[in-house]
Image (cartoon, helix red, strand yellow):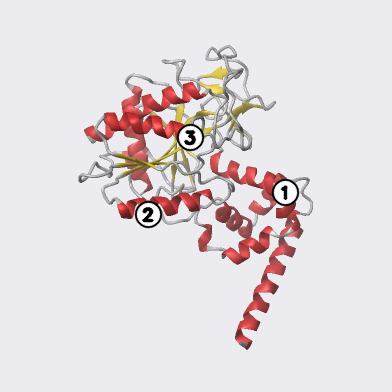
Amino acid sequence: MQKKRTGRMLCSLALSAVTLWGVSVTAPAKDARDALRSLKDETLGVMLLRYERGDGGEDFLSLRTSLALHATPLLREGEENIAQAWSAELEQKPDDSSGETGDAQDSEGTVLAQEETPDEIAVTENGSPARTLKASDPSGYTVFGNVYINNGSDAALDASMLAGDYAAKLGAEGPQVLIIHTHGSESYTMPPGQEYDVSDTFRTLDTNCNMIRIGDEMAQVLTDAGISVVHDRSLYDYPSYSGAYNRSLASIESYLQKYPSISFVLDVHRDAVQDANGQQFKLLCGEDKNAAQLEFVIGSNGGGLSHDLWRENLKLACAVQETLYKDYPTLMRPITVRNSRYNQHATTGSLLVEVGTAGNSLEEAVNAARLFAAGFAKTIQNGT
């Protein structure tokens, strides 16, 4: 009994020390985002980020510790802003100044900072200005065939590592592909008269308008191609955005146990792109102006978490992108590699795909999803 009391006392002292440390580190901060930057400069700050974003933080912090830290004034009073900042840690892309049009970052995605280009398109029916982003200069990229890869991770990467076939293959009879949505409530900009009920900024629980609808479209195309699909239509980012990756991972592992035949996992999201004034942009395929651009985000072991086979996922992404390139050279943006795992350690056929941006219309995202799914099906059926 005495040992338990001593343990509780030590735990309380430790939590008090952590709280005081957090306050001291973030006291000069003007707002939650500045506070987050301060926290990120410290080891425990990184632990907190990892825990909240569901990227292995469970290895560092217990649930009790997390709840205690949430009770601090900093985290309690700035919870919404900090949650958005954590979202940025997951969703923002590396500095693309080496070639792609977007060259800076914002709270959720890319900030367009340069002047208009020949790729600029007039404001469209849903009120969002449009662009087609493409890499034209290989400087700063790893180039493999027709695929440009922006390595924003600390993991080593060169084109020679991508030679050979990808590991994941269509297997035994049964479900082959799992479609899931870690951030299923993400949504788009609808034309006047087609608005939906929002649950948050560019988010909705209406499954006809959020990422669940995009997954439905992909699943239908894959099914029509003769590929067995399991589509998880759950919302893992509502009512709480933080921890969504932990929740979706638990489901992925459950599906893999139930259906050992699953070789491929598609985590389907949407991106966000805006200019320095906060104007949301849509991204459109140059070959089909009614289809949004897509992007692969590939996780790695650059953050120190176990994910030794991450390049197999990247090989698959390159293969799919090469297939799509033949008919739609600008449908896919350059691939982004990040330090975070994004649950892609679960299989060697795991991909996170961003379908359009918050500025795109639902119709543009749906059309893009269909084109992507057709190319994905063709790739994995051919095994190349």
Residue wearing tag 1: 78
Percent across and percent down for residue 130 are 56, 18
Dot 1: element: loop
Q: Is residue 343 above or below residue 195?
A: below
Residue at image point 24% right, 41% down = 170
Q: Quadrant of the C terminus?
A: top left
Q: Which mark is residue 254?
A: 2
* Amino acid carrying mark 3 in the image: Met
Percent across and percent down for residue 267 are 43, 41
Q: Is residue 134 visible?
A: no
Q: Which mark is residue 211?
A: 3
Residues under numbered marks 1 and 3 in contact, where contact means CB atoms less than 8 Å apart: no
Percent across and percent down for residue 103 are 58, 29
* Amino acid carrying mark 2 in the image: Ser
Q: In the displayed orientation, state which residue is furthest to the bottom.
A: 2
Quote the CA–CA distance across marks 1 and 2: 34 Å
Q: Quadrant of the N terminus?
A: bottom right
- The part of the image, by quadrant, that contains residue 120 is top right
Q: In the displayed orientation, state which residue is furthest to the left.
A: 172
